[in-house]
Image (tube, coloured by chain):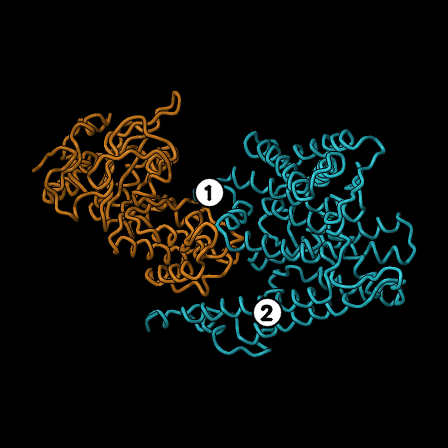
Chain colours: A cyan, B orange
Amino acid sequence: MTATTDERRTPEADAPNEPASLGSITRDYVARLRGGDIGSLPAILGLIVLVIVFSALRPDTFTTSLNFANLIGQSAGVMVIAMGLVFVLLLGEIDLSAGYTGNVAAAVMGVALTNHGWPWLPSLVVGILTGTFIGLVLGLLISRLGIPSFIATLAAFLGLQGVSLKIIGEGGTIGFQNDVILKLNNGNLSITTGWVLAIAGVAAYAAVTFLTMQRRRRRGLVAQPMLLWAMKSAGLAIVVLGMTAYLSQERAINPLLKSLKGVPIVVVIIVVLVVVLGYLLNRTAWGRHVYAVGGNTEAARRSGINVAWIKLSCFMMSSSLAAIGVILIASRDNSVSPQTAGNETLLYAVGAAVIGGTSLFGGKGRITDAVIGGLVIAVVNNGMGLLKQPQATVFMVTGLVLLIAAAVDALSRRRATASGRA
Amino acid sequence: MSVTAPEQTAPTTSEQPLLSLRGIQKSFGAVHVLRGVDLDVRPGHVTALVGDNGAGKSTLIKGIAGIYPFDEGEYLFEGRPVKVHGPKDANELGIEIVYQDLALCDNLDVVNNMFLGRELGSQAMLDDNTMEQRARETLDGLSVRTLKSVRTKVASLSGGQRQTVAIARAVLWNSKVVILDEPTAALGVAQTEQVLRLVRRLADRGLGVVLISHNLNDVFQVADDIAVLYLGQLVAQVRSDEVTHGQVVELITTGSSGAHGNTNGNTNGNTNGNTNGNANGNANDGPNGGTDGTDGVTTTPGGTR
């Protein structure tokens, strides 16, 4: 960069490269919030409020590490389905069949595993590929034939419900005996492995973000301030290490009978999915094209992006992740039934993505939204259960939470339009 | 060399058109939209393409862009006949179109929009830093000072800034011809001024610029040449300093400027010796085809630039 280009830069553009203070970081953030770019903030605040309320009402049960581990296990399936839905929602489409797609996939895995005695890995792969195949068919119907996704996936929702009934049999279940499949959403890491992974994860985050920051600074690009990097890394370290310590405690009601401690294995699955899918969305050309199609399909088409392929691949992604999600639910249940991913599973997953901050209008959303939103829904369900509320109340409260999330989305969109941030 | 073949045997490099169309015909079913259009786009020149609604402006540029093929006629790029079957072919030749609706993604930032569909880096890993640098350099090269940060989402930009991004995207690719469809239609006075200055700078950098506009003030401000389409025929391609506002309006509305005895177009055309237009195409131009040079600008496709 020469001196002349530096002159052209306005002072504002250069400011972020100067050593920032706590005050300026806060000011930038508040300015973004005021502009309507709120992201997952409402969901995180809501989560904190819910945790405080339930902790106050049920201090003896809600805050125990046993309950915390349960909560993760209960929400994992919905979270993973919601991650898949994020791809479809980013396009401004919907996949109503994700729940039963996963159900069929889990049933296929169960048949291979239990009825045919296949080893766990091929069974799992066949199950996930079943999901991918359903996604391929849906994607072709929607992208090539032009059936609206609402109708195509509504048909699949009904049809696949029938398919899973057919595979499993009315009122039947397929039980799992395989240890690996059962451990997916029941097992825990050893204490040592948990700590090693937690520390390695935090260190990797800090290192990667630090190197990114340095590389940008060397090339004269605006980089995030060192202070912000330190705050983010320290924050992540506190949360991750704190949770690891909490989950490393003995949490069995009767430890002599069966010891329960360590970070649940499903946490690793979720973290790996978040990192891999987040990378796909943010660092690859494909991910950028997904956002482009969701933001302005016509512009994407004129830029030479293969819109049909982007749609097709997003539906394949959604269905594959739905398969993984329902397999996690089935793993927790130790079996798969025609109603493993019942009607509310899909709606919870859509709710999770939207509560987390993914827009139903397309173009806006992140993978982490699915995790945060999934936690909100799980905390409501879990906390209401501990308060001994009837299912009727749980549904009503969950509905209210979703409504609040949608209202926040709508309001922030209005605000964003007013301030031109959309 | 008062009349030469369309291929133009011995032009100076700066005078050779980047893009030439000869005898372009295009019909949609029974509707004959383009009837033997000849158009030249020269490096370093802003060619304004004007005409009333339905005159065939959009059809012409969409054909140039490769969105649909012309039925008949020659498409020459840098003197060579080329076949353009799709937008990618046009892009590879170095032809970029800035559409009226801009075709930007609001939810992406300036850099991502400029590189949309042609991202740098491998498929598996985008090179965001290089893209950001090149976007910045391109904007700086166009002396764009209105964009604070290239990482701003396009949604938060003003109309003029969006237009700037769309134009910058078009010149990012070492393009040779940039076609702008009504770039100032939705802009305020100050922003229009900004965009027109930018259009002028593109031409000053040696690009061939085609400006489609309904606003004759804009046209006279920046254009070197004015090409007038009337009912699918190019009734005139004249130097903008040789015609008056009123004559252009008349050409747009009636297809001829009438017999005002204005000989500017003709005389200058001859002295320039720039005669790549073809007499044949002219003769087919219906009501104007048979008139001789003394009428003014209507018969000048052969003699003007």
**Along the horizontal axis of the image, is A298 left or right of A398?**
left
Whole-percent x, y for residue A356 in the image: 68, 55
Q: Residue at left 56%, top 34%?
A: A143
Question: Which quadrant of the figure has residue B248?
Answer: top left
**Along the horizontal axis of the image, is A56 left or right of A37?**
right
Front residue of B19/A211: it is: A211
Q: Residue at left 40%, top 50%?
A: B184
Front residue of B49/B43: it is: B43
Q: CA distance from mark 1 to mark 2?
A: 37 Å
Front residue of B9/A99: it is: A99
Whole-percent x, y for residue A217 in the image: 44, 71
Q: Residue at left 50%, top 61%?
A: B152
Determine which residue is flagged by label 2: A203
Q: How many marks?
A: 2
Q: Amino acid at mark 2?
A: Ala
Screen quadrant of the C terminus of chain A: bottom right
Q: Chain of mark 1?
A: A
Determine which residue is flagged by label 1: A305
Q: Amino acid at mark 1?
A: Ile
